Amino acid sequence: MKERRTNSAERIHGKGKKSKALAFSFILCTLIAVMTSAVYAQGVLLLAKKVSGDLPLDVTDNIWESASPMEIPLSPQIVTVPMIDESSITRAHVSAIHNSKDIAFLIEWEDKTKDEDLDLDRFTDAVALEFPSLSDQAKPNFAMGDREGPVNIWYWSAARDTSGKGPGQEATTNETGEYTPNFQTDEDHLFIDEFQPGVLAGNPVSRPRLSPVENIVAQGFGSATNMDRSRSQKIDGTGRWEANKWKVVLKRQLLSESELDADFREGEATPISLAVWNGSEGHAGGKKVFSTWYYVGIETEERGQAYFSAWEASKRIALTPDLDPNQLADAGKEIFKNAGCGLCHSVTGETLTGPDLSRIGAESDVETMALFLYSGTDVMPPANNPPAKLTDAEITAVIAYLESLGGRPKVRIGDIEPPE
């Protein structure tokens, strides 16, 4: 098998520009597609445990012990510029609780540096949760939504978390290393627009913040809109860095008056995704690590772990040896879609970030497809594959779908031998 892989790589590199474009295409597809391995292999649903009493913002509250955290792999954002190639942050753990009125999430991730100061060359640590804005819509693109599918983003920034600092202000550091608010205004005048020209001009960045969490709606990259001055529900949040780890709690009412805010209904599941920024690695804006879609299920007395486990199982694609190539291609199409491959690659001739795949079935073979889906980094470095991998059956299904693009699917489950 190793000899076959080497020969395939040599053959690809020797075919000129067209093959190089094809190889580049597969590497990009691999980078996005493998992000969803946890969706298929480890489970897709985070259970929001129902509890009694008020929900705490304290990240150390004992109530969090009643929740079951879910590990979510994170991958560098490579869909659009600005992007990053790698990051030390590769995963986060998320827990959720609710009390039939409010819902709260605890997000934890390893970070060796505490970045909460802003300057020309200094960036802040941050985290965001993303949900579909419209409760009845299909899942939008997990990368900031799309025109047909807006997303609601809860964005917490360490620089905006004013715990122990000043009211509503980001932090900077002066020449002596002491904390200094961005501007000094006594609280009696803090919310008078006439004392703040940026606020008077309507600059949302200049307004004093009542919470370190921004409520954002987006319909694709570059479209983020701050909803802080709308009727949208206020999102509370607080963070704590200790022992090389961030713990952040985000809290909001289950239901919102705004149609653009995500709603959480008891006994139902809502898509959720995650993004993290590491200030010491220069992360800001599109420079981040992020996840694909998962789900958060809102527990009730009648609908608990057993119900949502069955619901989760129903969402998985059954890949069995009895599927014929056309059925397998249909399953592969769904995996391709859920993986977000379409963010970079068109299958209709449209120009996107990555090469068009509309004729890939006629221009490549199963051996080459498997080579890149399994080992893109090995045959054409550099490429930054996220830590998770699709299962062998899922890779076979994706190959069947790619075969159908300009060709006829032939592969079946069991036909492809994984590389050693």
Image: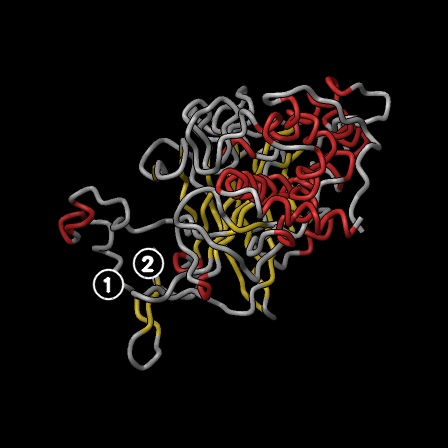
Q: Are marks 1 and 2 in contact (CB under 8 Å)?
A: yes
Residue 268 visible in image: no
The image shows a total of numbered marks equal to 2
Q: Residue 140: horizontal and vertical position, in percent?
A: 51, 28
Q: Residue 362: horizontal and vertical position, in percent?
A: 60, 25
Q: Residue 407: horizontal and vertical position, in percent?
A: 63, 21
- Quadrant of the rendered structure where residue 300 is? top right
- Residue at image x 58%, y 37%? 272
Residue 26's place in the image compared with 256, above or below, is: below
Q: Mark 1: which amino acid?
A: Phe
Say left or right for 65 vs 123. Answer: right
- Residue at image x 42%, y 61%? 282
Q: Mark 2: which amino acid?
A: Gln
Q: Secondary structure at mark 1?
A: loop
Residue 289 visible in image: yes
Q: Residue 159: horizontal and vertical position, in percent?
A: 40, 60
Mark-to-mark CA distance, 1 and 2: 8 Å
Q: Secondary structure at mark 2?
A: loop
Name the one closer to the observer, 168 or 6. Answer: 6
Say left or right for 164 vs 389. Answer: left
Q: Which residue is mark 1?
A: 183
Query: Considering only order in the chain, which callout, 2 or 1, is on the residue closer to the N terminus?
Result: 2
Q: Which residue is mark 2?
A: 169
Label 1 CA crowd tier, 10 Å (few <14, some 14–19, many 20+): few
Name the one closer to the observer, 267 or 70. Answer: 70
* Residue, far bottom: 176
Label 2 CA crowd tier, 10 Å (few <14, some 14–19, many 20+): many
